[in-house]
């Protein structure tokens, strides 16, 4: 079982969709609402990340799991080759250890990723009751896909223009734009 990750943004001030793009989409030509719009973009980004179970902006995540069997599916994505920075565990003697990076590899299947052993290697035996810690880089490093940016901008427009929580139908344009980016759904 995976536990909630501790996330550290590579650029804490970065927006998933640039403010200039949002203002262009909304036909806003003044700077009075820049702070508000930035906050709404952050809220919409958090909503999309939760809805799709993905990380949008580049982040370093530290996650913990109960055992190496959990590596069949990493809890966060998207990740890329070379994204795993460290796999740590506590050995039978109670000492912190790091798994040799040459003993495992990362397999990618779209938004899903798993960590697999290379031939001739075995996972170490961690101390009973101790969790395994994985540090990984996640998020889109080469730009967020258009459909996701469009969904964020649609949500920003809805919140900015309505300023209240409006009821949503059972299926919306938001869902349609994000359907191919939902992990584990």
Image: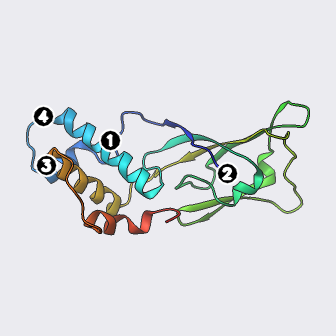
Query: Which residue is labeled 3 in the image?
Result: 162
Give above or below for 82 relative to 88: below
Mark 2 / mark 4, whichever is N-terminal: 2
Describe residue 39's horizontal placement relative to residue 60 as left or right: left
Query: Which residue is labeled 1 in the image?
Result: 42
Mark 1 / mark 3, whichever is N-terminal: 1
Query: Which residue is labeled 2 in the image?
Result: 1
Q: Are marks 1 and 4 in contact (CB under 8 Å)?
A: no
Q: Which mark is residue 125?
A: none
Q: Nearer the viewer, mark 2 or mark 4?
A: 2
Mark 1 / mark 2, whichever is N-terminal: 2
Question: Looking at this view, is 98 or 65 the one in front?
Answer: 65
Colour convention of the picture: rainbow
Residue 107: name its quadrant.
bottom right
Q: Position of residue 50 (x, y in %)?
A: 43, 51
- Local SS, label 2: loop
Q: CA distance from mark 1 to mark 3?
A: 17 Å
Q: CA distance from mark 1 to mark 4?
A: 17 Å
What number of labels is visible? 4
Residue 97: name its quadrant.
top right
Q: CA distance from mark 3 to mark 2?
A: 40 Å
Q: Position of residue 43 (x, y in %)?
A: 31, 43
Mark 3 / mark 2, whichever is N-terminal: 2
């Amino acid at each position: 079982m995976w536990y909630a990750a501790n996330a550290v943004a590579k650029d804490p001030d970065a927006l998933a969709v640039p403010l200039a793009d949002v203002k262009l989409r909304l036909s806003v030509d003044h700077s009075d609402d820049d702070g508000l719009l930035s906050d709404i973009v952050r809220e919409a980004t958090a909503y999309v990340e939760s809805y799709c179970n993905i990380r949008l902006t580049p982040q370093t995540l530290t996650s913990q799991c109960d055992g190496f069997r959990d590596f069949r599916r990493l809890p966060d994505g998207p990740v890329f080759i070379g994204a795993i920075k460290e796999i740590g565990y506590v050995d039978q003697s109670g000492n912190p250890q790091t798994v040799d990076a040459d003993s495992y590899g990362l397999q990618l299947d779209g938004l899903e990723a798993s960590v697999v052993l290379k031939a001739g290697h075995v996972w170490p035996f961690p101390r009973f009751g101790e969790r395994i810690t994985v540090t990984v880089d996640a998020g889109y490093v080469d730009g967020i896909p258009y459909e996701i940016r469009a969904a964020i901008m649609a949500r920003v427009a809805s919140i900015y223009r309505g300023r209240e929580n409006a009821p949503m139908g059972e299926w919306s344009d938001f869902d349609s734009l994000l359907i191919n980016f939902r992990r584990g759904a």
